[in-house]
Image: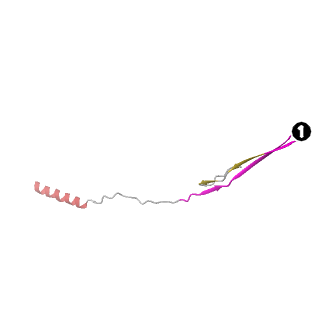
């Protein structure tokens, strides 16, 4: 009787080994690469000037002008609107 049971166990084990999945490659999901364009914006140069005129009691006139200059520059990304 032990021989018969051992035979059935051997046959069952051989069947399980035969059905086993032998592929060991890891699953790699598909990779989706999305390319988004990057906006490059060039901000123009700006100037702001202020003129002050002063007249002295001796009749002399002095004129002073102050100029603020912001050079042009390049930004990456959407344009930022500045309030004026």
45 displayed left or right of 57 = left
Q: Which residue is mark 1?
A: 58
Q: Residues within 10 Å of mark 1 (few under 14, many from 20)?
A: few
- The secondary structure making up most of the magenta span is strand
61 or 9, which lies in front? Answer: 61
- Which color scheme does this rendered protein use? secondary structure
82 displayed left or right of 4 = right
Residue 4: quadrant of the picture: bottom left
Spot occupied by residue 31 in the image (x, y as percentages of width and height)? 44, 59
The answer to whether residue 25 is magenta is no
Looking at the rendered structure, the secondary structure element under dot 1 is loop
Q: Which residues are magenta?
A: 36-64
Spot occupied by residue 46 in the image (x, y as percentages of width and height)? 70, 52
Residue at 64% across / 56% down in the picture? 42
Figure quadrant of the N terminus: bottom left
Residue at 87% across / 39% down in the picture? 56
Q: Is residue 36 above or below residue 52?
A: below
Residue at 10% across / 56% down in the picture? 3
77 displayed left or right of 57 = left
Spot occupied by residue 34 in the image (x, y as percentages of width and height)? 50, 60
69 or 14, which lies in front? Answer: 69
């Amino acid at each position: 009787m032990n021989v018969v049971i051992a035979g059935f166990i051997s046959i069952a084990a051989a069947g399980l080994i035969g059905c086993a999945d032998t592929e060991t490659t890891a699953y790699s999901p598909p990779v989706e690469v999305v390319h988004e364009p990057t906006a490059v914006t060039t901000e123009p140069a700006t100037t702001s000037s202020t003129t002050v005129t002063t007249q002295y009691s001796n009749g002399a006139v002095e004129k002073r002008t102050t100029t603020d200059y912001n050079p042009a520059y390049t930004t990456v990304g959407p344009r930022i609107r500045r309030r004026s």
